[in-house]
Image (cartoon, rainbow, N blue to C red):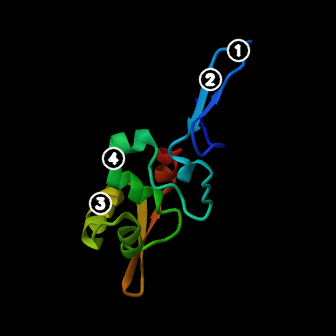
Amino acid sequence: MPSPFCDHAVTVVDLALPPRIRYPARGLATGWHTDTTTPPTAPPTAPADLLGRTRARILGHLAQPTSTTEPAQRLGVTPGTVSRHLGVLHRTGLVTRARHGHLVLYLRSPLGDRLLM
């Protein structure tokens, strides 16, 4: 049986019990990891199925007013790609936008919030 508490295979012999072999569990690097500073990057399944994975991920990053640059950097895509997806999300009413100086800031709309629930 895999165990996160051993670093090599261990055989346990007890005549009253079935034989057991314990060995190091794989994937321990992520077993204890909890990061509360960044939101999850994987979108919920239903919005990703409906919108596509990239649009759902962009929508998930719009809890606060954001330009195209930040989601592009976080998701590893170009600002042009984010801009194109934001245009679609805006036309469908899932995000709102407002000009702030030379920037256009996008924010998830109440409809977008409900979609991600």
User: Residue at 72% of width from left, 13% of height from top?
Assistant: 15
**Inter-mark Cα distance, 2 to 4:** 48 Å
Q: Which of 107 and 18 is in front in this view?
A: 18
C-alpha separation, residue under disc 1 versus residue under disc 4? 53 Å
The kind of residue tagged 2 is Arg
Q: Residues within 10 Å of mark 3 (few under 14, many from 20)?
A: some
Nearer the observer: mark 3 or 2; the answer is 2
Specify the farthest residue to the bottom: 101
* Residue 72 image point, x, y percent: 35, 69
Do we see residue 94 in this rendering?
no
Q: Which residue is drawn at 63% across and 18% down?
A: 19
Of labels 3 and 4, earlier in sequence is 4
In the picture of the structure, the residue carrying the numbered disc 2 is 20
Instruction: Give amino acid for label 3.
Output: His
Amino acid found under the numbered disc labelled 1: Leu
Could you say which disc has been placed on residue 17 in the image?
A: 1
Question: Is 38 located above or below residue 4 in the figure?
Answer: below
Looking at marks 3 and 1 on the same chain, the residue that comes earlier in the sequence is marked by 1
The Cα–Cα distance between marks 3 and 1, rounded to whole angstroms, is 60 Å
- Residue 56: % across, % down: 39, 51
Which residue bears the numbered disc 3? 85
> Does residue 12 sit above or below 109 in this rendering?
above
Q: Residue 51 carries which label?
A: 4
Quadrant for the C terminus, please. Answer: top right
Marks 1/2 in contact by CB < 8 Å: the verdict is yes
